[in-house]
């Protein structure tokens, strides 16, 4: 029975989505937009965080780039980069800390987050990379 919503049908009095490989839902959780997918181990939060990305590009040249996350979870992140990275490549991310004069309670640097490149997409001259953290964030 049709209900006017693509990929859905009415079953008794309930709306049921047809089986799909990937189902993405956006929900509001604690005032943050969180994206949940049936294939994700933890929810992603759409949050732009500045990070230093340290890696080697496809030509083998090492670089450090100030970039940002587009979304992040305890097990991974989506970041932007102008460099080309290889699938399964290991990269290091560090979150910049404020200047030491701003607060004595803030450490001068954060420990690096080690991640593996899972996927890449292009968005104009910018590239988007899906990363999986080797150790989940706590």
Image (cartoon, rainbow, N blue to C red):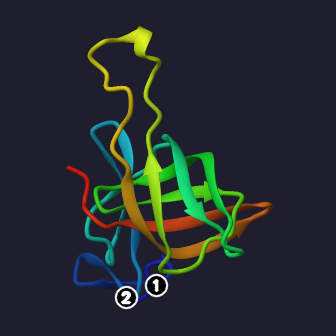
Q: Is residue 125 above or below residue 110?
A: below
Mark 1 vs 2: CB contact within 8 A: yes
Q: Are there few (<14), some (14-19), or many (20+) residues within 10 Å of tag 1?
A: few
Judge whether 9 appears above or below 97 on screen. below
Query: Residue at 39% across / 76% down in the picture?
Result: 23
Query: Of callouts 1 and 2, which one flags the residue occurring earlier in the amino acid sequence?
Result: 1
Residue 122: give x, y in percent of width and height. 71, 69
Taking depth in this image into account, of 37 and 84 the one nearest to the observer is: 84
Q: Residues within 10 Å of mark 2 (few under 14, many from 20)?
A: few
Quarter holding residue 35: bottom left
Q: Is residue 26 visible?
A: no
- In this orientation, does residue 45 appear? yes
The quarter of the image holding the N terminus is bottom left
User: Residue 11 at x, y = what percent?
Assistant: 26, 86
Q: Mark 2 = which residue?
A: 18
- Location of residue 21 (image quadrant): bottom left
Could you tell whether 76 is left or right of 54 in the image?
left
């Amino acid at each position: 029975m049709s209900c006017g919503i693509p990929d859905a049908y009415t079953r008794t009095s309930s709306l049921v989505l047809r089986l799909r490989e990937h189902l993405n839902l956006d929900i509001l959780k604690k005032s943050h937009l969180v994206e949940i997918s049936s294939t994700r181990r933890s929810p992603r939060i759409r949050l732009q965080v500045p990070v230093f990305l340290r890696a080697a590009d496809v030509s083998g040249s090492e670089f450090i780039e100030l970039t940002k996350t587009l979304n992040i979870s305890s097990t991974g992140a989506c970041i932007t980069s102008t460099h080309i990275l290889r699938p399964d490549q290991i990269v290091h991310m560090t979150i910049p800390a404020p200047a030491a004069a701003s607060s004595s309670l803030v450490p001068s640097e954060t420990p690096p987050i080690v991640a593996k490149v899972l996927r890449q997409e292009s968005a104009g001259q910018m590239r988007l990379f899906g990363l999986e953290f080797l150790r989940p964030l706590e």
